[in-house]
Image (spheres, helix red, strand yellow):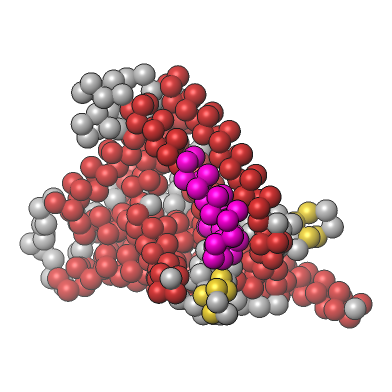
Amino acid sequence: MSTFLILLPLILTLLFSLATVPILVWMERRVAALIQDRLGPNRCNVNGIRLGGIVQSVADMMKLVFKEEFLPSHIKNKFYYLAAPSIAFMSSFLTFMVIPYADNVTINEQTFTMQALPTDLGVLWFLAFAGLGVYGIILGGWASHNKYAILGSMRATAQVISYEVAMGLSLVSMLITYGTISLNEMVTYQSQSFFIFPAWGIILQPLAAIIFIVTAFAETNRAPFDAAEGESEIVAGYHTEYGAMKFGLFFVAEYIAMAASGALIVTLFLGGYQLPYLSTQDLINHFELVLWLIITFAAVTSLLFLAWVKKHNILVMNGLNETKIYTTVIVGFTLFAIIVMSYYALGFGNASTVGVMLLQFAVFTVKLFFLHFLFIWVRWTLPRFRYDQTQKLGWNILLPLSLVNIFITAIVVVGVNYGN
C-alpha cells in the first residue's frame, strides 16, 4: 500500500499530462464545433465504438507515431534540430511534477505527499521549466535554417520574455498573500473563508489572477497569442520543417504546457483540490455524509447522461449499439460506488482518509478540465493578436499593473499584520 501511494502522484502526473492529450484534442474539436455550430468528429470508430469522437484523436496520435521520419537535406546542425522537440516536450512535462493533487495522506502514522516531486519550491520549479521550454522553440527555429521558422522562434522568444516578467510579478503578490512558496500550503490556505466567500486566490487577488491567466495563454503560445506559429503569416513558424513524431513532440508539448498552466491556475487561484469552505479534516470528520452526497450526485448525473446519450447517440455502426455499452459501464460504476460505501460502513482500514483523497483527486480534475475548456473557448473566440499588440499588452499594460498590484498587496498585508 505504501509503495502504491508513493508512486500514485507520478502515475497521476502521467495521466494528467500525457494520457489526457487525446482528450484535449477531442475537446478542442468538439468545442470548436460547438462554437461554429457544426458536428465535429463523430465517424471514426473501432468496430463501431466511437466514444463520441475520441477514437479520431487516438488515430491522429498513432498516425504521427508511425509516420515516416524525414530529415531535410539542408539541415546543418542535426543534433540541435533533433534535440529541440525533446527540450520543448520535457520542459512542459516537468512543470507538472510539483502540482499537488490532494492533501498529504497519513496512514499508519506514515505521511505521503501527493506530489510527484515533493518539494516546497513548487512555484520556482514551475517558473524555471516554463521559461526553459522556449529554448526548444529557439533551437527548432534556428536549426531548421528556414526564414519562417526563425521568424516564429524570434516571436516566441520575445513573447516569453515579455510575459514571463508580468507572470513572475503576479506570483510575487500571491506569495505575499499566502506567506509561503509551498503549493500545498497555498491550497490549505484557500480552505478558509474570506467574509462570506471562500478564500480562493481569485477572490483575494482578482487582478493577479487575471494577469497570470493572460500570461499563461502567452507562455503556452495559445491563441490569441499564437503569432509564433501563425499559419496565415509564417506557414507554421518554428516547426515548419518538422514532421512525424518530431512535430508530434512539439504538438504534445503545447497541450502539456496548457494542462500544466491550468493545473497551476487551479492550485493558486481556484482552491486547488479543496471544496469551498471545507478543509481536509472537515471532509474526514463528515466523510459518511459526504460519500452519500457523492453517490446521490453520481446517480442523478448518470441518469441524465444516459438520457442524453439515448436521445442523441442513435447511430448503430457494424451492428453495435454504443448506448447499451455505456449503460452497462455506468451501471457498473454505480455498483462499484455501493461497494465502496459498504466497505466504509463495515469500518475496514482507513476508508475515510483514502476516500477524501479520491474525492480531492476528482475535485482537482473537474477544476482542471474547466480550465481546459476556458483555454479552448478563448482560442475559438478571439482572433490572433498582431506582434506589436502582443508586445504592447505585455510591457505597457500587464507589467505596470502587476507592479501596482504588488505595491497594494504589500500595503494591505503590512497594515493587517500591524493591526493584529
Q: Where is residue 361 drawn, in percent x and y?
A: 52, 57
Q: Is residue 159 left or right of residue 409?
A: left
Q: Is residue 192 left or right of residue 161?
A: right
350 drawn magenta: yes
Q: Quadrant of residue 40?
A: top left
Seen from the viewer's position, the closer of residues 217 and 158 is 217
* Image point (63%, 45%), residue name: 292
Report if residue 172 is visible in the image. Answer: no
Q: Is residue 157 left or right of residue 403?
A: left
Seen from the viewer's position, the closer of residues 121 and 8 is 8
Q: Where is residue 385 drawn, in percent x and y?
A: 48, 48
Query: Up-down: is 263 above or below 336?
Result: below
Report if residue 346 is visible in the image. Answer: yes
* Image point (36%, 19%), residue name: 314
Q: Where is residue 147 drawn, in percent x and y?
A: 25, 59
Q: Is residue 261 left or right of residue 89?
A: right
190 drawn magenta: no
Seen from the viewer's position, the closer of residues 29 and 301 is 301
Q: Where is residue 280 drawn, in percent x and y?
A: 66, 64
Query: Up-down: is 328 above or below 99?
Result: above
* Image point (20%, 31%), residue name: 47
Instruction: Give, as a single range, the part of the protein colored magenta.
Output: 334-362
